[in-house]
Image: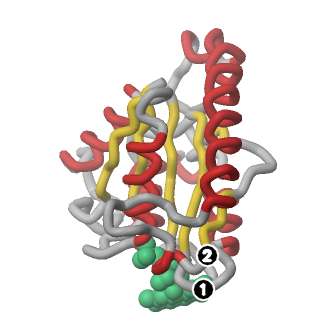
Amino acid sequence: MKYLAIVGTNSDVSTNRMLLQFMQKHFSSEAEIELYEIKDLPAFMEPEDSDVPKKVEELSQKILNADGVIMATPEYDHAIPAVLKSALEWISYTTQALMDKPVLIVGASHGTLGSSRAQAHLRQILDSPELAARIMPSSEFLLGKSQGAFDSAGNLIYLDKVSELDEIFREFVLFTDITTKLLAEKAQNKNAKKFTWQE
Ligand SMILES: Cc1cc2nc3c(=O)[nH]c(=O)nc-3n(C[C@H](O)[C@H](O)[C@H](O)COP(=O)(O)O)c2cc1C
């Protein structure tokens, strides 16, 4: 499996990035995980022409080429960070590259709740008809107290969380496989969808 792992923040120091880096290393024998930084994407605005910014095109291509996407989100004011929302708005408005793409949501926070409200928020956004990602159901990976969660080599030191992540990732690989097979026929007949607000 080939996954694109989107770091849901533009902060230079981020425990969500550390979580994805850990996953990249920890699951290297099961999957190829490429990290993607959204910090260089422009802030979303409705362009007058239909040109897609280069960075948005790059992200879209990477999403389309991947078997699935992993998103790690911090929690800002009970929601996802504005930069992550902006990146999703670009995808929704231009390439719709996330449509039918298997997605796993994970997240880390410095407090105890592990970004649970932001993850629920992200799930709702990804389920919009314009994004229509196939989010792995009934799964949550909440890494609380994330500032103390990694050792100097980047290993996740909360062993219960490592076991939880192992199980969720195993399930996500299966979910990716099943979802891709189920939607294969639809993928062949895929036409760009028009939404009422686009007419
Ligand atoms: C503007 C702002 C708002 C925040 N709001 C919340 C919040 O609503 N809930 C929460 O648990 N943590 C909140 N925090 C702390 C973040 O959860 C925490 O910094 C972030 O999830 C950790 O992710 P990171 O290490 O990848 O930056 C907030 C932090 C900032 C800067």
The structure residue drawn at horizontal position 29% and vertical position 56%, both measured from the top left corner, is 37
Residue 189 in view in this figure:
yes
Residue 123 is left or right of residue 145, and the answer is right
- Indicate the position of residue 15 as horizontal and vertical percent values: 42, 70
Is 50 placed left or right of 25 in the picture?
left
What amino acid type is highlighted by mark number 1? Gly
**Measured from the top left, where is residue 13 in percent x and y?**
30, 75
Q: Position of residue 52 (x, y in %)?
A: 26, 45
Q: Are marks 1 and 2 in contact (CB under 8 Å)?
A: yes
Amino acid at pointer 2: Gly
Is residue 196 found left or right of 14 in the rendered image?
Answer: right
On screen, residue 193 above or below 165: above
**Vertical relation: 94 (above or below) 20:** above
Residue where numbered disc 2 is placed: 144
Q: Which residue position is annotated with label 1?
A: 111
Residue 6 % position (x, y): 41, 52
Residue nearest the viewer, comparing 92 with 33: 33
Asked if residue 76 can be seen in this view, the reply is: no
Mark 1 CB lies closer than 8 A to ligand 1: yes
Q: How is the image coloured?
A: secondary structure
Location of residue 141 (image quadrant): bottom right
Is residue 36 shown above or below 41? above
The residue located at (52%, 22%) in the rendering is 191
* Residue at image point 41% right, 40% down: 4
Q: Nearer the viewer, residue 186 or 154?
A: 154
